[in-house]
Amino acid sequence: MLDSEKTIKLLFLGPSGAGKTTAIRAISDIPPVSSEVSTMDAASDASVSTTVAFDYSTIQLNPNEILHVYGLPGREHLDFMAAIVGPGALGAVLMLDASSQTLAQDCRTAVEQAARIDPNLRFVIGLSKTDLAPEFSMETMYALARRMSLFVPIFSIDPRDPAQATQLVRALLYLL
């Protein structure tokens, strides 16, 4: 890295299956380093993948700025990774699964995780799988955010879509 190069560290936080790894893949300039493993979903007996350490990639913002992107695991027993990877981050994207029956608790947990990393960590919220949750409405999420005293940008996105995933990162960079 050149001395004149500026690095920015951003995190993707949220529960397992919310789309953190997928979003990072969608926006990365290089293939991400990923620590995904296959596991069995107890609810459906289906094989799913989950991050067990972290995902990492970079995005060249301009000739002198590199965005370092880290995706943290969403499983509670792997929460210790936040203390290892999180320090020095300038902001975070909180990815939440809108089809989850535990959306409100998932949001609280992600916000608490962000606060443990840095009480002043700025973040945006990305909601995935809204198309799989016919009962979900953005107004419900806005109401939850108000109850939690969160005044942050909230987006419904498809993390597979590079333009939509990039919108989250741009919104976060704008906050910073």
Image (tube, rainbow, N blue to C red):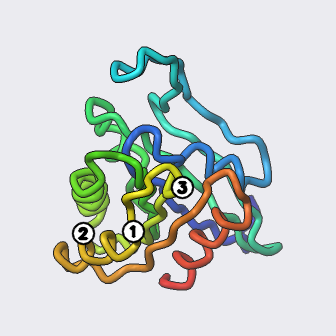
Q: Are marks 1 and 2 in contact (CB under 8 Å)?
A: no
Residue type at mark 1 is Ser
Q: Residue furthest right?
A: 63
Asked if 74 appears above or below 69 in the picture, the reply is above
| Residue corresponding to mark 2 | 119
Q: Is residue 116 visible?
A: no
Q: Earlier in the sequence, mark 1 or mark 2?
A: 2
Q: Earlier in the sequence, mark 2 or mark 3?
A: 2
Distance CA(mark 2)–CA(mark 3): 32 Å
Q: Residues within 10 Å of mark 2 (few under 14, many from 20)?
A: few
In this view, the residue in front, 49 or 144, is 144
Q: Where does residue 63 sit, x and y in percent of width and height? A: 82, 73
Q: Residue furthest front?
A: 134
| Residue corresponding to mark 1 | 137
In the displayed structure image, the side of residue 49 where residue 34 appears, left or right: right
Q: Earlier in the sequence, mark 1 or mark 3?
A: 3
Q: Please name the residue shown 48% across and 64% down the image.
A: 126
Question: Which numbered disc covers residue 131?
Answer: 3
